[in-house]
Amino acid sequence: MSKQETTYDFHRYRQLLLEAVDETSRLQLIDLLIREKARDRLEAQRTSDRVAMTAETVAKVLGTGGRHEFFQRG
């Protein structure tokens, strides 16, 4: 599965929503979101972003040397 297939395609869904001007097209959009498991992909993407932000924060707190640098200073 490519990255495009596993991520939430916000811009595409937003454009499809703008184009869904009648009940039939809105129901088709809902069906598409269900088939593509859009909610699950959005949650996975949010979780991934949260983990990346946490890792970045931890790296900043520990510095570039991490624990090794802390113990050397003694």
Image: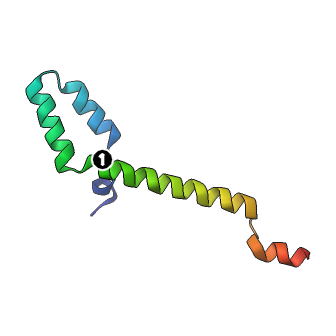
Where does the image place residue 11, in percent across and percent down from the top left?
33, 37
> Callout 1: 10 Å neighbours few (<14), some, many (20+)?
few
Q: Where is the N terminus found, in terms of image quarters?
A: bottom left
| Image colouring | rainbow
Picture quadrant where residue 20 is located: top left
Horizontal side, residue 13 vs residue 49: left or right:
left
Helix, strand or loop under label 1: helix
Q: Residue at x 74, y 64 (%)?
A: 62
Image location of residue 41, percent across then percent down: 32, 52
Q: Tell me the quarter of the picture where residue 3 sits.
A: bottom left
- Above/below status of 1 relative to 13: below
Name the quarter where the C terminus is drawn. Answer: bottom right
- Residue extending farthest right: 74
Q: Is residue 13 above or below residue 37?
A: above
Q: Position of residue 61 (x, y in %)?
A: 74, 59
The residue sitting at 22% across, 32% down in the picture is 16
Q: What residue lies at 38% left-to-right and 55% top-to-bottom?
A: 44
Residue type highlighted by circle 1: Arg
In this image, 74 relative to 9: left or right? right
Give the labeled residue for mark 1. 39
Question: Residue most toward the top?
Answer: 21
Farthest-out residue, left = 24
For the image, the number of numbered tags is 1
21 left or right of 39? left
Q: Is residue 48 above or below residue 14?
A: below
